[in-house]
Every structure is written in C-alpha cells, then in structure tokens.
Amino acid sequence: MIRLLDRPWVAASSAAAVAAAVRLPGVFTQALSQDEVASARILSEPSLAAMLGRVARTESTPPLWYTLGWLMHRAGTPLTDVRLVSVLAGCGLAATVVAVGCRVLPSGCALVAGLLVAVGDEFVVHGNELRAYELLAFLTAFLVWLLLRELAAPGRRNEIAIAGLVAAGGLTHYFFALAAVCALAWALLDPVAQPVRRRVSVAIVSGGMLAAVWAPVMFAQYRRDRFWWIGPFQLRQVVAVPTRLFATALAGSPSGLALSVTGFALVCLGCVRLARVGAPGRLIVAFAVGPLMGSAALWAAGVHVFALRNLIGVGPSVALVAGSVVAGVAERGGVVVASAAAGAALALPFGGTAAPAPPFGAIAHALVAEGWRPSDPLAVFGNVFVYRAPLGWYLPGSPLLDAARPSARRCRTVFVVADRLLPGRLIGRLVRRTSSRGYVVARLALAPAWRFHGAAILDDPAVVSGCVRPIRTGRLAPVS
C-alpha cells in the first residue's frame, strides 16, 4: 500500500477520494446558508441577462461561477445539486496539490499537502457550498501546475491554457488577480524562469485583459460597500490566515492565538526551505505569501476586503509549504517523527467542526403549521444574518425577509424562532409553541409598545404588516 502511494497518480486519486468523501454528505443534508440563498436566487433568474444583472446588482464577485451554475440549472439540475460544482472543484484541488507537490517534495509529503486541502476546515465548508470559493482555490492551484509544466516543457498549448485559466480565475473571484500578479512577478524576477519569461508574461496579461471586461461592473459593486462588516486592520487576523484555513479550533482564544502564531512561524520556515528547491519552490512560495501580503496591505490602506474565505486561494500553496516542513522533519528526525508531525497537522481540522446550518425547511414548515402568513412578522433569537435570507427562501413564496422594528400599532401575533428555550418574559404571551429539530417555533400575542430584547424582527417589506416598519438606516445590506 505504501509503495502504491509513492506513485503520483495513486496519491492524487487518494486525496481526491478523501475530498469527495468529506464533501458529498453536506450537499444533500445541509440547508442553504445565507450566502447560498443569494446564489440560489441568482440561478433562478429566467434569462442570462437577468442573471448577470442580478450578479452586478447584488454580489461582490464576477459572474463566471454563476453563469456555470445558471446553465446547469436551466438544463434541469436542481439548485441544491449545483453544489456538486464545488465538490468537483474540491476533488480537483486535492489532486492538483498532490501533482504539484510531487514536483518539489517526496510523494508522501505531497500526499500530506493534498490531504490538508481535502480535509481542511475552510475547504470543506466551501467544498459543498453554492458559492465560488472552492473553484477559486482549484483554479489557483491549477495555475501553479500549468506554470510548472511551462517551465519544464514550454509549449503553445500550455500558454493558451494559462491565458484561459487566468481569464477564468479573474472572472470567478477578484482575489484571483493577486495570484496572477504573483505569477507575473515570478516570471519576471526569477532567473530560472528567464527562458519562458516572455511567453508566460504574454499569456498572463492576455488572460487578464479578457477578465478585465468585467472591471467597470467590479467598481460599481465595490461602491455598494458590501464589505461594511470588515473592521479596521488587525495584524492578528493576517497572521492567523495560514492556520485558520485548515483549522478553526480555538479561534478567538489565547490558545488559538498561540496556535496561529506557531502555524505562521512554521509556514515561514517552510517557505525558506522550499525556496531553496529552485524556481518551482519559489513559485509556490510566491503563491503562498504574495496574495496574503497584498490583501493585508490593501486592508491596512483602508480597502476593507480582507476576509478568510477570500484568501482561500493561498491555501493550496500553504499546504505545500506545510508538506515541505514535514519533509524537513523527515530529514532530521526520521520517518517516524515526520509521520507524527503529519498526523498532528491532519488532525487539527477535526478539533473544531463548523456548526451545521439550522433546519430552515423544517422551521418554515412548522411556522406554516402554526398559522404564519406573509403579513406576520418573525422574531428570531440568534444571529440575524443566519436566519434572514434562508428562512425567507424556505417559506411559501420565498419572501425577501429583512430587518424591521416595531411600530406603535399592535401586532395581533408575532411568530418566534429560537435556537434555545424562550426567555421567561415571553411565556406569558405564548399562544402556541412547537419544536423543530431542537429549534423552538412559537406564536405570541403582543402588546402595542412591547419590545423584543435580544431578538431581531424580520418582515417582508413588500407586504404591509402595519405593526412593524423596515429598518432603512445603518449599513445592513438589503436582501434583493
């Protein structure tokens, strides 16, 4: 078995199989999350023009992933099954990381890198999601593979593939541009890349020009300030990225900070070691460090677009750097010590699992059974962003629920959703209560001036409720 894993195609296939195994269950069991509902509404548009218009109006990313998903849905694929695009991207990502790793690392260490992206927290979360992030990670890793192939055996077909991939990446997510800039810098500055410098540069620039056709829309999207929730620059968050891409355990705690700093230090050591391998190693280091430092610089300059999910593209190269660290441990401590180090790294993602999405379909069914109507407001105890878009999607007619506040008029009834027991102050106003997979759904009678402390009120602005009014102030991005 160990000898089989020494073969690159077997190691790559094994990593892809693990990636599929951890992603597929969520495709068919998880309810759509808040961002996925936004994608679902886009993919449900009746025409290509309407779909593109909605992307330009409501999203902060380019249209390629949405176009692919829209075409699949129009061909008869159920919306939930479009998540399989992310699953396939996750499998391709794991296999590509192994393939790249086999060019600069022992096959066992390359397999460790592939398994890291197969089971890493951020990759699994987005690997069965109705969003473009996993595709971004795959395209970034595949660009590294194409560049290494060009370095080893230059060819016109490969250069066309690089141009096409740069165009596709730029039209998938704006952060891909940071990876493309790093690739261009490597081609221009690395002395070993001199024989392919002009060819690679032309390919990257050509692909970038194709992606730039969407640039005017990008600036319009940015002006809508959908990143208002990102706070001022914090070095701690930058340092945490290499670790948090793979493990969310202990996030926000002093122990988590220590883990992040340790992970960042190990990545720095791995980068030094990998850079000594030659031009292929320096390319991987550029992809691991460049986009992270570039996005951090933008954040420090006041461009608030720094978010962990946007930086998923550095994950494949960080995993390869981690594989380099394991290779260094093997050289100094032997196979047993290296195996222990690899095992510890692969165990980290299992230290903290993401909370599953609430069962929005079951909650919506319970609300309707309790007598909910489109004119009835909803009070939710919990994160308003978790409930706002998905709960509306699963209710009859898929209303666009948005934040509201009580008015002076009396509500005959308000329906409550809570992820815990109802506060005691509400029990006296209880009309009916039921349970839905651990969530409380209740119908309450309200007095005119009563306020829900600790709850958010959701209502459809298109339906006149009378007893609540939409929140028009603040920076809460509207659902549309």
Image: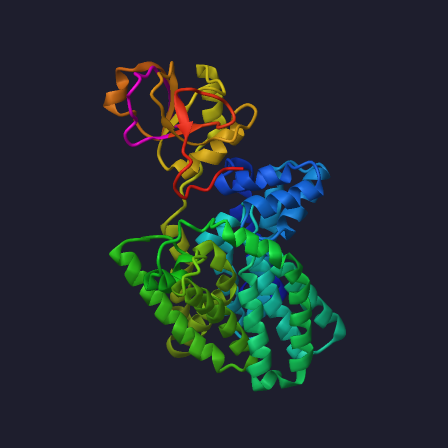
Picture coordinates of residue 58 (x, y %)?
55, 44
Residue 408, placed above or below residue 320 = above
**Residue 134 in sight:** no
Which image quadrant for residue 426? top left
Q: Quadrant of the C terminus?
A: top right
Q: Is residue 9 magenta?
A: no
Q: Is residue 250 left or right of residue 358?
A: left
Q: Is residue 72 above or below residue 177?
A: above
User: Which residue is depicted at the point 38% across and 56% down?
Assistant: 348
Figure disc tally: 0
In this view, 9 is above or below 119? below
Q: How is the image coloured?
A: rainbow
In the rendered view, does 245 fall on the left or right side of 287?
A: left
Residue 278 or residue 457, whichever sits in front: 457
**Residue 118 at least partly seen:** yes
**Is residue 233 shown left or right of residue 20?**
left
Residue 321: give x, y in percent of width and height. 46, 70
The residue sitting at 57% across, 57% down in the picture is 136
Residue in front for this viewpoint, 334 or 73: 73
- In the rendered image, the quadrant that contains the N terminus is bottom right
Q: Is 280 above or below relative to 310?
A: below
**Part of the protein shown in magenta:** 434-456
Q: Is residue 437 magenta?
A: yes
Quadrant for residue 355, please give it: top left
Q: Position of residue 243 (x, y in %)?
A: 39, 61
Could you tell me residue 162's position as x and y percent? 67, 68
Question: In front: 67, or 22?
Answer: 67
Q: Residue at x 58, y 73 (%)?
A: 183
